[in-house]
Image (tube, rainbow, N blue to C red):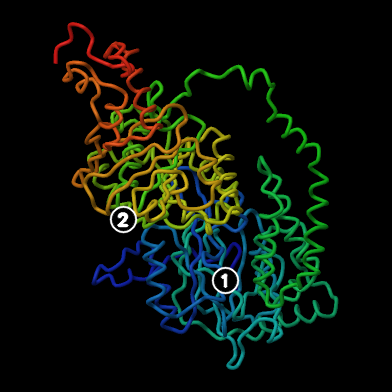
Amino acid sequence: MKPYNGAKRPEPTPVAPESADAANGALPDPDGLLAAALALAAEGVKVFPAHRVVDDGFGPTCTCMDLKCKSPGKHPRNDHGSKEATTDPGLIRQWWQKWGVHGRLNFGQTLTGRAVVDIDVAEGKTGDATWEGLCVELAPSDWAPGTLTYRTGRGGTQYVYTLPEGESGGKADGYSNKLGTHVDFKTGPNAYVMVPGSKTDDVYTVIVDAETAPLPEWIAEKARKKARQGSEGGSVVHAGSGSQLSDLLSLPADDPYRSSNDWVAAVAGHYAGDAWKFAPPRGWTWYSDMVRAANATSAEPHPEDRLAKTLWSVWEAEAAKHEQAEAAAVVQLLQPGGAFFHNVPEVPPAVWGHGEEILWAEGEALLIGAPQGVGKTTLAHQIIRARIGLQPTVLGLPVAPGKRVLLLAMDRPAQTRRAGARIFAGDDPHRLSERLVVWEGPPPADLARHPETLMRMCEQAGADTVVVDSLKDAAIGLSDDEVGAGWNRARQFTLREGVQVLELHHTVKRGANGAEPNTLADIYGSTWITSGAGSVISLWGEAGDPIVSLRHLKQPFAEVGPFRLLHDHTTGTTTVHHTADLVALAGASRGGISALEAAKAIFETEKPSAAQKEKARRRLAKLVEAGQLEAKAGPAGAGTVYRAPSGALF
């Protein structure tokens, strides 16, 4: 007999399914993944969406964006994994439209009524040798696998078999999940393997395109014997605390080891260790959420009282290892008081602005609040374009160029793509790819519940600027102060790492008495959202209006505006449509203008408030300092008037 693995394994002859609906050109499917998933579903095999390993220019990365992902490209995208698997082609196509057409989707296939012999050879594992030994010892001399065979993304081999009629697989039918060292036996409704066309290190392919054969009796008996050894306390080997987290999580949901406290402790140990690998550490909330999520995937999850004890015990043990490291990290973040309070520039350095007119200051978040359809995304795209060095100014104010922008296109990304296509259409696509990276769709985690995630996404993208479009998609429940504080922590972690933060958000529907929103209270959500921002801009108008208003509700230095903005929907650009030209106004008046008259022109009201008159006075004073106007005492009781300098022509 010739073993079908090890040195004598056949050379792979990949067979990729034809592109799904290729005749209609409905959906692009370069690796045949969608076609394979639909074909399996048509045969009654349930599939579900999983993450994929991609290379966005920063090396192979799982689309979950976790830098320390323990199972890249093989864990579910949906909340309940294989428990939400389906044979519905419409739902499968929806998943594909959402993630697959952008190359960011794998599919898993469940194994009810089927079994897979999974031979692992990655990173020096000895699955080939184990399988060869099993074949020599147990298989008939003339035996050959003779069934559908996959080559995995990490170079291993998977033989797919059908179980005897009436069996669904797993523990219920007396099967172990192991045949030997680095040879797994995956079977049952809670087990899964990847669909061909999925990608981890490489793309999963079909290397023997054959009918799925019945499970050979010798393999079945070996799996049952392993299960009996386990139940009798024999020598069956389970993934222990020294195993990879992916090994622990990939155990079938009904595997007996999952019911042991050892399994929970091992999983908790991995996540506790991960939590301390970041500065600052991810913290108890992230750690406990991750372990509870893993526990929930078991057929018989551990009860909360027992789970809570294990969680706390493991966390305390891990924290004790890091007491000195934690203290050192804190010391590194401490600054001398003299340097903190004395090394301060008189005017904040500007990301967007000049002199005292600053709309976005370095190290402080800028929030643009607006109702739907009035151009906040259009304005953000122009700021992005300036930030990556493709235009010098936005609304007439300079924008400091940065290195790379991460755009979180979470709110209606298809619409964002269409809007951006107008303004970026004439730009070099290679430059855009070098300087701009886009995350499409929901974030990998709620950014308020996991505040370090935003910082880590920026780190992974190599970005010094992040544009969050929009806050409602970054965190759920923004009207809750706990969520608002969580989001503020996320932005502050990110700012501390030197990343500039621009946030797009929504206003309440109307201000007082249906008027234009003009206070920070008119920005939707918890007060901590605006309290933690350095600058807040409000845009107002009706959806689709070419002319909208801009108000600077919170300033890092002096107030800028108000302005009226003109959106050119054809080119995707925005200009200042109207501002009160105080120099021209003063020049046209024989006696000059007062602060009251300036306020009436600026704010377009016959009854400006005291605050508005003071803002107008400050703008006039700046023009005097610049030599564009001169201030003179007016008639008795009239106060100061401002007029054109002597000799000026208008």
Q: Residue at x 83, y 57 (%)?
A: 313
Secondary structure beneath dot 1 equals: loop
Label tally: 2
Q: Which residue is mark 1?
A: 80
Rendered image quadrant of residue 173? bottom right
Name the N-terminal-most of marks 1 and 2. Answer: 1
Q: Is residue 67 visible?
A: no
Q: Pointer 1 and pointer 2: residues touching (CB < 8 Å)?
A: no
Q: Residue furthest left?
A: 650
Residue 31 or 623: which is nearer the viewer? Answer: 623
Task: Tell me the residue that label 2 is attached to.
Answer: 415
Q: 587 above or below 37?
A: above
**What secondary structure is marked by label 2?**
helix
Task: Estimate the x, y position of residue 323 in percent, counting from the top left.
Answer: 81, 40
Q: Residue at x 17, y 16 (%)?
A: 590
Task: Give the amino acid at mark 2.
Answer: Gln
Quadrant location of the N terminus in the rendered image? bottom right
Residue nearest the viewer, comparing 443 with 598: 598
Give 618 or 173, whichever is nearer the viewer.
618
Q: Position of residue 541 (x, y in %)?
A: 28, 49
- Give neighbour class at mark 1: few <14, some 14-19, many 20+ (Cα, 10 Å): few
The residue type indicated by label 1 comes to His
Q: Can residue 484 be seen here?
A: yes
Residue drawn at point x = 23 percent, y = 9 percent: 645
Above or below residue 40? Residue 54 is: above
Query: In the displayed structure, does residue 355 sit left or right of residue 5?
Result: left
Task: Kindly report the distance in space between the C-alpha atoms of the residues bearing marks 1 and 2.
Answer: 29 Å
Task: Name which quarter of the figure residue 253 lies in.
Answer: bottom right
Q: Which mark is residue 98?
A: none
